[in-house]
Image: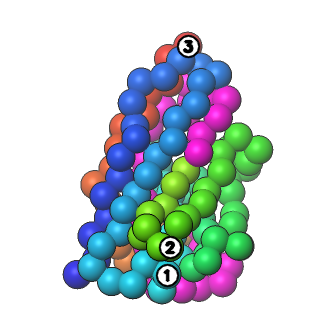
Amino acid sequence: QVQLLESGGGLVQAGGSLRLSCVVSGRTFSAYAMAWFRQTPGKEREFVAAANWIGRITRYADSVKGRFTISRENAKNTLYLDMNSLKPEDTAVYYCAATYTLNPPPPGPNDYNYWGQGTQVTVSS
């Protein structure tokens, strides 16, 4: 069984930075495309960024392009999301997700099979 565990969320002022991590256990990490999604109360889960199995193909939501960077270390079974120039509208619960390798990594939540429990990111103005 695949398990995903996010960490790194917290409270940060607008303009600040955070790094989220997601450790994957249970199966071969490099077999999966990985993604980050986020969700706020009353809204649907929103795509943030995705990376293919080796991290060389990435895609981003327009709202985070140029500010967020997705990366992965397959040797450490870990996915990252570096978030810079944070805005109050980035406030959400952030989830990592995994799916068997697809190129390019898909942006839809229904394309992902495994999910973490989420980590809260709060950006104050």
Which of the image's four quarters has the N terminus? bottom left
- Indicate which disc, 2 or 3, sits on the residue closer to the N terminus: 2
Residue 115 visible in the picture: no
Residue at x 74% of width, y 48% of height: 65
**Who's the residue at 38% across and 77% down the image?**
113
Q: Residue furthest left?
A: 1
Q: Which residue is mark 1?
A: 30
Q: Which residues are magenta?
A: 82-107
Q: Amino acid at mark 3?
A: Ser
Residue at mark 2 to residue at mark 3: CA–CA distance: 35 Å
Work out whether residue 71 or residue 15 is closer to the camera in this orientation and state it: 71
Which residue, given by chain and number where applicable, does mark 2 sit on? 74
Q: How far from the left and from the top, in percent, is residue 7?
A: 35, 46
Image-quadrant location for residue 58:
bottom right
Mark number, residue 125: 3
Residues tagged 2 and 1 counted as in contact (Cβ below 8 A): yes
Distance between the Cα atoms at labels 3 and 1? 38 Å
